[in-house]
Every structure is written in structure tokens, then in C-alpha cells.
Amino acid sequence: MKDLLMFFYAGACFFCALAFLLHIVKRRTSERVAASAGLVINGAGLGAVMLASGHLPVFNLFESMISTAFILLCLYFFFTRAEERLPDVVLWVWIEVFLVLGLALLSPKILAPSRYDFNHPFVVCFFLFRVGALATILFSSAFIIQARVQGEGLPAETNHFYQGRNFLLLGAILFLASEYSGMIWCQNGWGDVWRWGGGHLQSVFIFLYLMLAFHIQESKNGVRGIRSIVAGMSGFVLLALTVMRGVE
Amino acid sequence: MKEVTRKLSSLSFAGWTVAALILWCALGIVLAGSKALSDQVFHMNEMILRDWLIRPQQGALLLKVWFLGLCAGMMVLGVNLVFCTWNKFVRLITRNRSGVSKYVMLVVHILFGLVALGHLGSFMLGYRYENIRLSEGEAFDFGSGLSIRLERVHFVDDLRVLQLTHRGQTAADFHYRSNYADMVLSRGGREVYRDRVFILDPMRFKAIQVTLKRFTSPRLRRSEKPGVVLVVSRNPVLTTFLLIYPFMIVGIGLFLGITWRKPHGSMINPKPAGLNQIHHIHPRA
């Protein structure tokens, strides 16, 4: 099984790298074709994980990372468009995809043991929404980073900061949905919506960080101010905490 | 007075408070991960936090100080929320401002305040008895004449699975929907309620919840059938809390849906809607 997983993983990496290079040389159609191949192979890998383990591929670090890469690729297909100049949003999305795939490479390439409660709806929702939130917030970071790099002055249609704000809010909704599922799981399993410990405090940390990203004041510097730094870092903060939890 | 009100409701006050709370929370993560205090943090789950806080023999002083600091930070944030929500409400009413999104965000902020209060309520109200170990026929009294009795255990799997940790129990060797315990709740010796309790499917009677945490190996209990480990808890604000929370999520979703498209004709907005919209209207504006 490990060989098959590595085959799908290597295949996805190869086609994503190819798509990235094609993006650099501005061959947009070829890039999309290579990215499609990467997406299909990544999806096939996830399907193999599901068939072999009997659960959704969201329960350990390796599974979470390849699922996050898959969602990022889907978002790339549906919500980005070709831009004339580099760097652009897609470039940052590709860098994020490689970061996530690289973390998958560094994590133990094993399937999560099929724990007895991995088919419980609230347990599944907790992990699934968390992975969805991670991918969406990383995607929002790509827009916000691009807005920061680009600066102000472009037409409203290309207002990346606003797009980033949209996906950050969407990611926050997914994160809250994950938390809500986790609370019901916790209530039914341990008799309380809250358990004191590192995991729950990390959730509060993420919640507060997102609050800060939405509330931080900006008076002078527009998209090049502190808000774009905090909001743009959201995806990486969530990724770092996910890796920390996965390593534990 | 107006100046104080303005500052208390300001966006920068909210931002600094949240930033301070993030640092405080990071300190909590460090404390929870430290060898010296991780057990103490874990013990905070064993009873209602009100009792943990007021009993001098319970918990490390450092943790109590940390928890009180967290509460203080949340209270400051609550003050900011009350002031800015009130200002926003007054402005929406008096200036007859249009825009559904502003009202939705106002409601979301109010719901967030209620969710935070719900969390505080679950820390301070009701009761909680953790790790109650019972074998068939045994009972546990938990005050006011209430007691819970384990009438029968039904366990279909190989008992050796109980020697594994929670993480080691797989779907193939532990069937959590087939194993259960029949529980009887009594008041003053008189049965008031009975139910079948499964793992992840607790028994509820009014605000009282009996949760089956796990089964215990009979070898440890010196009897033939497995025993159980229970949590008996009562959280009077639980239902309200669990109802409000999804409304808050739906409210944010509604707000996102309304404001997904950027208003026409504008260039990059230095203060885009949704990143701090509730604070947009300055009391002096």
C-alpha cells in the first residue's frame, strides 16, 4: 500500500511541478492540462487511501496534507484566472501546494489506523471541516499576499485583497463548523463541550487569530499595512498548528 | 465621558485586546505542554471549573492566575463588544442606514457575545463528576438525593480490546454502536428515568447528562463483565449554547453571501467590508 501511495504522491508532485514551470513560462493552457493531471492523480491517491483504510483521508498529518493539496487545486481551478504579470495569485497558490506536499513528504507516510469512531458523523465533520478551513484560508493567503506585493491602484475587478477577505471569511466559517462538530463530539464523548488541554487551546488561538485578522485597524498603509500581514499569515499559522498537532 | 466611551468602543481597543488574548492563549498552550503543569491542566477537566477555582487544594496557583487572566481579557473584550454594538445599533436606528449586511454583522456580534457567555456559564454553572467507575449493580450518588445505577452491561467484542488505548481500538475490533450500558437514574431512591447509554450517545434527563467514556477490563474490576467509566454532568446553558452557535455561523455565512461581490466603482478599499465592519462607524463621525 505504501508503494501505491508513493506512486500517487510522486505523480501528483510531478504534474504540479510541471504545471508550476508552465505557469512561469506563461503557457496557460498547458499549465491547466498538467494541473488537471496532478489533480486527478492526487484524487486517485485519496481514493486509494479511502478504499484501503475505510475512512476519509483527513485523520493524520499525511492524509490531511494531501487532502489540503487536493482542495487547493480545486480552488485553483474554480477561482483563479490567468494574469499578465508575475508574480500573480496562481504563483502563490502553487507555492502553497508545494509547501503542503512537502510537509506530506516529511510526515510519516502511513494511513491513520481506522479508529472505531472514525465513521461517527461529528468526528468526520470535525476533521473534514478543519482540512477544508486550512485549504481555504491558505487560498485566501495567496490573494492577500498578491495584494500586498502588487499594492494599490488596480481596478476593482482585480482587487485581490477583497477576494482574499472573502476566502478568509469562508475559511473562518469552515473552521467554526469544525469547532461546532468538535464540541458536540466532545459533549457526547466526555460530557462537556470543552476539555482543558493543548488541542482546545490551539483552537482558541486560531479563533482569536482570525478575529485579529478581521478586526485589526489600518489607517495609513492600505493593503501594504499590518492587516495584510496578519490576514496573509492566517493560512500559515493554521498550517503550523496543524503540523504541530499532527506531530504530537 | 464621551471620550472614554469612544475609546472603549474603538476598533484599536478591540485589536489590542485580541492581540493580548492571543499572547495569553499562547502562554496557556505552553503551560499545557509543560511537563510540570500538563497533569494539572488535565485535572481541570475533572470537575466544574468553579469548584476547581475556589478549592485551595485543587490546581496550581499559576494555572488559576492564568485562567483568571483569560477571564479578565474576555471581560475587557466583552466591554468593547457592548459599547461598539450599542453605538452601531444607535447609528443604524437614528440615521436610518440601509444595508442588510450591517444588521447581519450586528446580530453576529451579539451572538458571539452570547456564545462567550455560554462558555463562561458552562465553566461555572451546574456540576460535573468525572471518571466514575461502576460495575453491574453499583450506584453513584451525586447530591440532592440523585443517584445513577449501572443495571446491565452488554458487550459483544473480545474483552482483550479493552486493554488497548482509545487510539488503538479499531473499528474492526470494537463496535461502539453494539456495546452499551443500561443506566437507571433515581431520586430519593425512586427511579425517575432509565436509558441505554452507548459510547458517543449519552443519556439525557432534563439538564443531567450521563456519558459513557469507556468500558473497563473486567480483570481490573475482578468481575466477569466489563465495568464502565462515566461522567455525570449538568450544564443548564448547554441547549441554548448549542442553538446559538450555529446561528452565529449562519450569520457569518449570510454576511459573506451578501458582501461577496465588491461594491462597484471602488478601487482597492483600505477598509474592506467584513474586516472590522462593525467598527466602521465612528461615534464622532
Image (cartoon, rainbow, N blue to C red):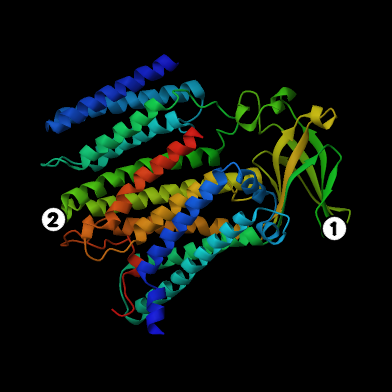
Where residue A141 appears, as percent x and y from the top left, is 29, 46
Question: Label 1: which residue?
Answer: B145
Estimate how packed mark 1 is, as few (under 14), some (14 to 19) or many (20 or more) residues with alpha carbons within 10 Å.
Answer: few
Q: Amino acid at mark 1?
A: Gly
Q: Amino acid at mark 2?
A: Pro
Image point (79%, 43%), residue name: B183
Considering depth in this image, is A189 or B61 the residue closer to the camera? Answer: B61
**Residue sticking out furthest to the right:** B189
Secondary element under disc 1, as helix, strand or loop, is loop
Q: Which residue is mark 2?
A: A155
Give the quarter of the figure containing the N terminus of chain B: bottom left
Residue B10 locus on image (x, y percent): 37, 71
Tell me which chain the residue with mark 2 is part of: A
Q: Where residue A111 appears, x then y in whole percent?
A: 48, 24
How far across and down, in percent of the image, does residue B238 sit?
62, 57
Q: CA distance from mark 2 to mark 1?
A: 71 Å
Q: Residue at x 38, y 18 (%)?
A: A6
Instruction: Say which quarter of the image contains residue A22.
Output: top left
Task: Determine whether A134 is above or below B161 in the image.
Answer: below
Q: Residue A141 or A82: which is nearer the viewer?
A: A141
Check contact, mark 2 vs mark 1: CB within 8 A: no
Note whether residue B46 is visible.
yes
To which chain does the residue with label 1 belong?
Answer: B
Viewer can see residue B237: no
Q: Quadrant of the C terminus of chain B?
A: bottom left
Q: Is residue B83 left or right of residue A192?
A: left
Vertical placement of residue B135 versus B172, above or below: below
